[in-house]
Amino acid sequence: MHSCFPAVAQWMRSRQRSMKYISQVFVIVGFALLSLPALAQNGQITGTAKDQHGAAVVGAGVQVMNLSIGNKFVIKTGSDGIYSINRLAPGKYKL
């Protein structure tokens, strides 16, 4: 019976190494998944619509057009005159 204990101890050490390896892989994969949004190449256009006196224009229509593919995005300014268009593909835009 004493001859079984070294085998059990070796099995336990092997299992501990395997668990350590698996946990390291999960940590690496987790960091990789968290960094994916940073790799996305999207832009944003933000601004404020103001009248000739410098007051914010509420509910003004703002149109942004991608000049290379012709996509149009239309939004309205908020109660503070601010507009923001997110997740724009890289390219030249006309406001």
Image (tube, rainbow, N blue to C red):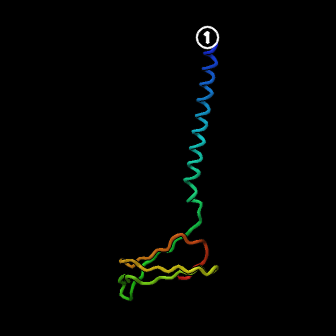
- x%, y% of residue 40? 59, 63
**Residue visible at 42% across and 84% down in the picture:** 60
- Count of numbered marks: 1
- x%, y% of residue 54? 37, 84
Considering the image in quadrants, where does the N terminus appear?
top right
**Residue visible at 39% across and 77% down in the picture:** 78
Secondary-structure class at tag 1: loop
| Corner quadrant of residue 2 | top right
Residue 48 to residue 16: above or below: below
Residue 5 to residue 73: above or below: above
Q: Amino acid at mark 1?
A: Met
| Corner quadrant of residue 65 | bottom right
Q: Which residue is mark 1?
A: 1
Could you say which is closer to the camera, residue 6 or residue 67? 6
Q: Residue furthest bottom?
A: 52
Could you say which is closer to the camera, residue 48 or residue 58? 58
**Apparent side of residue 80 relative to residue 12 in the rendered image (left or right):** left
- x%, y% of residue 10? 63, 22
Neighbourhood count class around disc 1 (C-alpha, 10 Å): few under 14, some 14–19, many 20 upward: few
Q: Residue furthest top?
A: 2
**Apparent side of residue 53 relative to residue 12 in the rendered image (left or right):** left
| Corner quadrant of residue 27 | top right
**Apparent side of residue 47 relative to residue 67 in the rendered image (left or right):** left
**Apparent side of residue 32 relative to residue 53 in the rendered image (left or right):** right
- x%, y% of residue 77? 41, 79
**Residue visible at 47% across and 82% down in the picture:** 62
